[in-house]
Amino acid sequence: MSVRDTIESKLRDTFSPEFLEVLDESALHAGHAGAPEGGESHFRVKMIARTFDGEGRVARQRAVYRVLQDEMKNQIHALALELKTPDEI
């Protein structure tokens, strides 16, 4: 399973989002420090989930980082997060 697929699967299972998009932006960082050959290191996640209701930006980010902690240690170099509730769109 690709890193992108792993991210998507874990986030779907944990947050049951109404919308989820996981973009591999590794090609934009090719040649930079922390960008391994072959990519799958830099990602952008756009997610809309009811589970974020009542949570601030930092709490939402921490929740995602907890779910992806293994990938953050070993595979993901950079992770950009756009996290909203359905009421915020």
Image: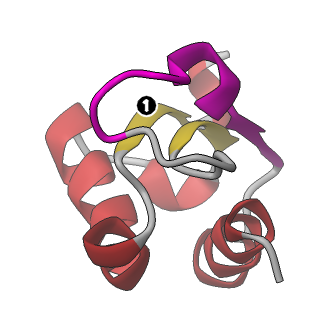
Say if the magenta span includes residue 17: no
What residue is at 51 percent from the left and 62 percent from the top?
51
Q: Residue furthest left?
A: 58
Residue 29: x and y in percent read 51, 20
Vertical order, 13 against 85 (above or below): below
Quarter of the image for residue 72 reads: bottom left
Vertical order, 18 against 65 (above or below): above
Query: Which residue is tagged 1?
Result: 80
- Given residues 77 and 17, the one toward you in this image is 77
Quadrant where the image shows the N terminus? bottom right
Q: How many marks?
A: 1
What residue is at 66 percent from the left and 40 percent from the top?
48
Residue 62: x and y in percent read 22, 58
- Given residues 70 and 54, the one toward you in this image is 70
Q: Which residues are magenta?
A: 19-34
Callout 1: SS = strand
Residue 26: x and y in percent read 61, 32
Q: Residue 46: in sight, yes or no?
A: yes
What residue is at 74 percent from the left and 72 percent from the top?
12
35 left or right of 55?
A: right
Q: Amino acid at mark 1?
A: Ala
Say if the magenta span includes residue 30: yes
